[in-house]
Image (cartoon, rainbow, N blue to C red):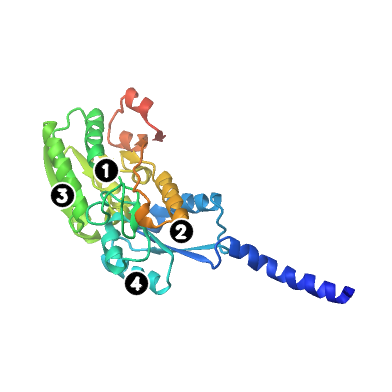
């Protein structure tokens, strides 16, 4: 073989090497659609999600692409963004519990991973162990956490008698948690009233309605509440209401304390599920997982503003103290 022909063959093979290597990593660029509630709330969680995907061998822009859409608690936006993702033929949709029913109604074939969901077995999966269908994800069993949150409120407000439970009236799972919280409060000898909100515009008026009529506030989290967390925590502080919430971002926004799972870890778990799906596992064959560790976070600046002295025993058990 002449030298010139040899060089041409080698150069031709070299031109195919990146393509061959790329094919071994899964062929075409795989696309993930993340349909979240609020960009600010989710930013640290999606960062953990992307970091975990990199650890699992995926390269952004080369083997994988992640596209984000933010619904802000609007079912209509969830529907519109889902339709957009389906038109783009994403390989997986990662979303949250309040959006799950809308997304699932739009597709029975595109894999859906719930990074945050209160009760995915309520019509979305056949069972936690064997989901079946095209949905899997992470389940947060709120009923087990409600009693703990109420006891935390009693520790910081020993004279607690009247409790208000705030929930999004437009989301069934939030109303279910509010009902369970009300029942749990009554077993502790507390007077409990449910405060229903309908959209962002209804939040401020509801606080006016309970001013001076409650000793503490239990907030049921969902997409609507998360998108308005700063408003809610500010109004609670102005109303001098000690508030317990479900995760640390609320406390960072001015809430008194939270007790719940580490959401960044949940998104890392979700990334593991996405990885399995992109490598060929059916979502219905991936068991729904549940968090095993929960965090207590306390905002001492808010406690001081409310005139509350947080017991040293509680501070010692806190996973994080702000202020």
Which residue corresponds to mark 1? 141
Residue at the spot 34% in from the left edge and 48% down from the top edge: 288
In primary-sequence order, the first of circles 1 and 3 is 1
Quarter holding the C terminus is top left
Residue at the spot 26% in from the left edge and 53% down from the top edge: 126
Pointer 4 and pointer 3: residues touching (CB < 8 Å)?
no
Q: Position of residue 249 (x, y in %)?
A: 37, 46
Q: How many marks?
A: 4
Say what secondary structure mark 1 lies in.
loop
Q: CA distance from mark 2 to mark 4?
A: 24 Å
Which residue corresponds to mark 4? 83
In primary-sequence order, the first of circles 2 and 4 is 4
In primary-sequence order, the first of circles 2 and 3 is 3
Q: Nearer the viewer, mark 2 or mark 1?
A: 2
The quarter holding residue 108 reads: bottom left
Q: CA distance from mark 4 to mark 3?
A: 33 Å
Which residue corresponds to mark 2? 280
The quarter holding residue 162 reads: top left
Q: Crowding at label 2, few (<14), some or many (≥20) Cα neighbours within 10 Å?
A: few
Q: Nearer the viewer, residue 166 or 210?
A: 166
Q: CA distance from mark 1 to mark 3?
A: 22 Å
In primary-sequence order, the first of circles 2 and 1 is 1
Which residue corresponds to mark 3? 195
């Amino acid at each position: 073989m002449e030298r010139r022909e040899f060089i041409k063959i080698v150069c031709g093979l070299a031109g195919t090497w990146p393509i061959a290597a790329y094919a071994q990593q899964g062929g075409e660029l795989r696309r993930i659609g993340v349909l979240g509630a609020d960009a600010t709330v989710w930013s640290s969680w999606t960062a953990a999600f992307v970091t975990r995907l990199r650890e699992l061998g995926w390269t952004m822009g080369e083997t994988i692409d992640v596209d984000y859409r933010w619904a802000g608690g609007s079912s209509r936006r969830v529907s519109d963004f889902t339709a957009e993702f389906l038109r783009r033929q994403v390989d997986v949709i990662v979303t949250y519990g309040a959006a799950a029913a809308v997304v699932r109604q739009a597709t029975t074939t595109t894999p859906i991973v719930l990074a945050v969901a209160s009760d995915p077995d309520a019509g979305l999966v056949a069972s936690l162990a064997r989901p079946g269908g095209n949905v899997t994800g992470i389940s947060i069993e709120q009923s087990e956490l409600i009693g703990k949150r109420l006891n935390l409120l009693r520790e910081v407000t020993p004279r607690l008698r009247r409790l208000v439970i705030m929930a999004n009236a437009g989301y069934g799972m939030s109303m279910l948690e509010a009902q369970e919280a009300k029942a749990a409060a009554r077993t502790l000898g507390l007077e409990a009233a449910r405060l229903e909100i309908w959209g962002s515009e209804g939040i401020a008026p509801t606080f006016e309605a309970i001013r001076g009529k409650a000793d503490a506030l239990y907030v049921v989290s969902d997409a609507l509440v998360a998108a308005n967390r700063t408003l809610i925590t500010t109004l609670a502080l102005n109303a001098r209401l000690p508030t317990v919430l479900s995760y640390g971002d609320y406390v960072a926004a001015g809430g008194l304390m939270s007790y719940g799972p580490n959401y960044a870890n949940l998104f890392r778990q979700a990334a593991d599920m996405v990885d399995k799906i992109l490598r060929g596992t059916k979502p219905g064959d991936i068991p729904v997982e549940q968090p095993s560790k929960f965090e207590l976070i306390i905002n001492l600046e808010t406690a001081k503003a409310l005139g509350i002295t947080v017991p040293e025993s509680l501070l010692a058990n806190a996973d994080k103290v702000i202020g």
